[in-house]
Image (cartoon, rainbow, N blue to C red):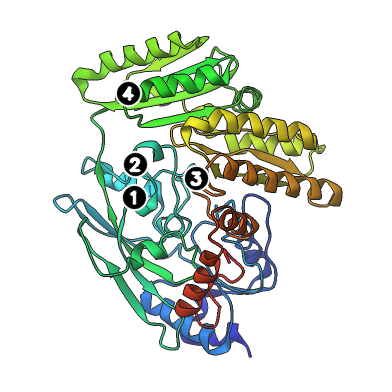
Amino acid sequence: MDIVGILKRRLGGGKVVDDPAIIGIYTREPSGLRGKGVEAVVFPENVEDVRSIVKAAYEYSVPIYPQGSSTSLSGSAYPEKGGIVVSFERMRSIREVNIVDAVAVVEPGVRIDELNEHLEEYGYMFPVDPASSAVATVGGAINTGAGGMRGVKYGTMRDWVLGLQVVIADEEATVLRVGCRTVKCRQGLDLTRLIVGSEGTLGIVTEAILRIAPIPEKVVYILAFYDSLEDLARTVIDVKRRGITPYIAEFMEAETVQRAKKLARVDLEGEGHMLLLGVDVNREAAERILTSLVELARSNKAKAIHTAGSTEEAVERGLFTIRKNLFTSQVHYTRERLGGKENVMVLIEDIVVPPSRLVEAVRGIMDLSRKYGFTVMLGGHIGDGNLHPAVGYDPEDPEETRRVEEWFIEVMKLALSLGGSVSAEHGIGTLKKKGLVMEAEALGSQKMIELMRGIKKVFDPKGILNPGKIV
C-alpha cells in the first residue's frame, strides 16, 4: 500500500511532501522529542482536503498526526508511531469577526498573534496567550486546551471556544458541527468541550468559533524582586484580598531570573525571586491601582520595584523580557552545561496547585532538585498556581535520563499531594500518561481512564488519530 501515492493522486502533488529533510522539520517538538517512520507531510487547504486525507487513512489504517506549529511540550504533537503528519499552515483564514456577537470564526492554522493583530483593528482581542503565541496556532491551542499568562483572569481555551467544525475518523470522514455562536448553548452532552483539550485524538478541527473580548482600556504593571518566596506570594494574596483581579501574575525563582537576565541581556535593577503583576483598569483608576500595587509590594519587603502605566511602556522598559525568556534560558543553560551539545532534552513540568499552596509546591520542587542532583529552572503563573519547573539533560546518557524521569514523576506526585493536578495547560501527550493514571488513582476514580478509552473508540474506531497520546 502506497499511502503517499494515493494522497498525491487524490490531493495533488503540491499538497503532499515526502522529502525526508522536510519531514524531519515536522516530526520534532521543542522539548527535543523526535518522531520516526513518517511517510509524508500533507498540507490541506480546505475541509474537503481533510476529508480526503482521513478517508484514505481510515481505508488503509494509517496513523494521522494533526499539527499546528508543533510547539507542544508534552509529547502531544510529535508522530510516535509513523504514518502521516497533517499540517494546517495553509488553512489560516480569519473568516469572520462580529463585534455585536463578540465572536471570530477562524481556520485552525491561524496563529494567535496574527488573530490578535487583526482583532486590534476592532478594539478586541482573543485572551488566551500561550508563551509561544507568535507561532502557536488556534488549532493547536484548542487541541492542548492551552492557557497562558492571562489565565489568572481569562482562563483557558475551554472558556473561549464556542463551537467547532471537526472531521472524525470514520469511513465517510464525517464532518461534525458542534456548539454554537452564542455563549448560552445547550446541545445535550457538551461535545465542544470534550474536543477541546483532546489533543487531536477524537477529531480534526477544521474551523472554530471563538469568543473575543474588548482590549482593556489600560493595564498597569509592576515588576518586583524579593528575597523570600513567601513575601512574593503574600503580595499576590494581598492583591486578591483587596478585591483586585490580576490581568497577569507571573513569577520566576531567583537563580532562573539570573540566567534569563544574562541570556536576554536585561539591564533591570533587582535580584532574587521575580514577580510580574498586571491589572487592567479604566484610565481614571490607573494611578490609584498602580500606587496600591507598589504599596503592597513594599509592605511585603520587595527589594526593587519597576512600574509601567501601560502595556506599551512595559514592553519598552523590558518588564516582560525576563519571563518571556524562561524556556529559551532553560535550553541555553542545558546546552552550556553539556559543553555546547545541540541534541539535548528539556523536560518541562506543567503542574498546577491551589494558589494558596504554591509556596509549598515551590519548596517541594527545590527539595526534589537537590535530591536528584539537578539544577531546576523554575517559573510559572502564580495567579492560578500553574508551575513550569524544567530540567535539561543529555538523552544519550541513560543514567541521567532515568533520574530525570524519576524527578518528573515525583513532581507530579507532589502536585497531587497538594490538591493539584499533573497538567494545567500543556496537555497529557506521551509524557504525562503515567501522571494521568496516578491522578485517577489519587482521586479514587480509575474508571475515568476506562471511560476515556471508550470515548476514543467511539470517535476513532480504528485508533488512527494521534495514536499513543493521552490514554
User: Between disc 2 and disc 3, whose residue precedes?
Assistant: 3
Mark 2 vs mark 4: in front? 2
Q: Which residue is mark 3?
A: 132
Amino acid of disc 4: Ser
**Residue 91, position as x, y percentages in the image:** 39, 65
Classify mark 3: helix, strand or loop: loop
| Mark 4 neighbour density, 10 Å: few (under 14) some (14–19) many (20 or more) | some
Classify mark 1: helix, strand or loop: helix
* Tags 1 and 4 touching, CB below 8 Å: no
Q: CA distance from mark 3 to mark 1?
A: 14 Å
Residue 342 appearing in the image:
no
The image shows residue 185, relative to residue 1, as above or below, that is above
Classify mark 2: helix, strand or loop: helix
Task: Give the camera-side residue of 103 and 48.
Answer: 103
User: Between disc 1 and disc 2, whose residue precedes?
Assistant: 1
Amino acid of disc 2: Tyr
Amino acid of disc 1: Leu
Q: Which residue is mark 4?
A: 310
Tell me if 381 is positioned left or right of 77 in this view.
left
User: Between disc 2 and disc 4, whose residue precedes?
Assistant: 2
Q: Which mark is residue 115?
A: 1
Q: Please tell me which residue is depicted at 62% across the width and 22% down the height of the picture.
A: 254
Q: CA distance from mark 4 to mark 3?
A: 22 Å
Amino acid of disc 3: Ser
| Mark 1 neighbour density, 10 Å: few (under 14) some (14–19) many (20 or more) | many
* Tags 3 and 1 touching, CB below 8 Å: no
Tell me if 453 is positioned left or right of 306 in this view.
right
Q: Which residue is mark 2?
A: 154
**Residue 329, position as x, y percentages in the image:** 64, 34
Check the picture and name the quadrant holding the N terminus: bottom right
